[in-house]
Amino acid sequence: MELSEITPVAQDYLKVIWAAIEWGGPPITATALAARMGTTMPNVSDTVRRLAAQGLVEYQPYKPVMLTEQGEKYAIAMVRRHRLLETFLATILDYPWEEVHNEAERLEHAASDTLIERIDAFLGNPTVDPHGDPIPTTAGHISRSLDATLLTHATPGNYEIIRISDADPAQLTYFRKQEIVPGALVNVAAADPHQDRILIKDADGKVVLLTPEQADAIWVAPS
């Protein structure tokens, strides 16, 4: 069975299951899958059982859903498609970064392997997408910073922003306006106990106060 032989819905499920653990999070549950996919628990159960029958996931009721080796291979291939399309849309077509995720979601199932590889070559084999997420190679290798940490866990000091979650488009719009983007250098100060905010300063000394929820969307590495 090839990746093209499974349904777009199945492809999306594999990608979401893999993404849940990419940055060190716990394996996703069926309940969390339902929330992430915007569907019902019975629908999730039916889809996951079909994926298990195809040898793509391991699933037991009331336990997290785990990918098999083949399921992980397909998930990473879909992630590669998605992130290359996001990069193409942002770099070549000048899409704002808060819009590329949904557009790539629509395009990734229709794109052929040949198109994806031509986009990769045209872009010069980029290693990260507009949000800082690493783009897997054709062999499925993924390179990410080993000393990356969530901003909420960062001690005071100087950091480089390396990744920002694309889960909330409105939040991405705010970050873009504040120039909180991958590659930006920031100084992290201690949290403000009176406002429950995390204070960061950019290279020009501009101060931005972030809520813990906003800071939870940002990954940094010591600079």
Image (cartoon, grey):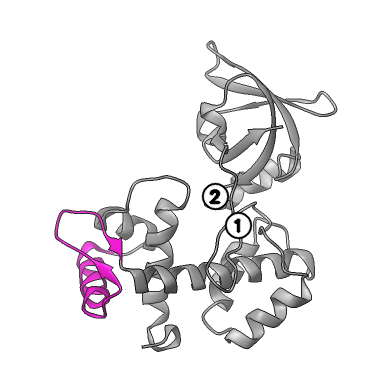
Label 2: few (<14), some or many (≥20) within 10 Å? few
Question: Alpha carbon of mark 1 to alpha carbon of mark 2: how far?
Answer: 19 Å
Q: Earlier in the sequence, mark 1 or mark 2?
A: 1
Work out whether residue 94 can be spotted: no
Report which quarter residue 188 is drawn in. top right
Q: Is the C terminus in the top left, top right, bottom left or bottom right quadrant?
A: top right
Residue 83, placed above or below residue 160: below
Q: Give the percent coordinates (x, y) of residue 210.
A: 61, 28
Q: Give the percent coordinates (x, y) of residue 209.
A: 65, 25
Label 1: few (<14), some or many (≥20) within 10 Å? many
Residue 95, placed above or below residue 199: below
Residue 95, placed above or below residue 25: below
What SS does tag 2 mark?
loop
Q: Residue at x 56, y 26 (%)?
A: 154
Residue type at the position of mark 1: Pro
Report which quarter residue 222 is drawn in. top right
Residue type at the position of mark 2: Asp
Q: Is the N terminus in the top left, top right, bottom left or bottom right quadrant?
A: bottom left
Residue nearest the observer in this picture, 39 or 16 = 16
Asked if residue 75 lies in the magenta stretch, the reply is: no
Residue farthest to the right, as pictured: 204
Q: Which residues are magenta?
A: 40-67
Q: Looking at the rendered structure, which numbered label has been put on residue 134?
A: 1
Work out whether residue 75 can be spotted: yes
Q: Is residue 79 left or right of residue 16?
A: right
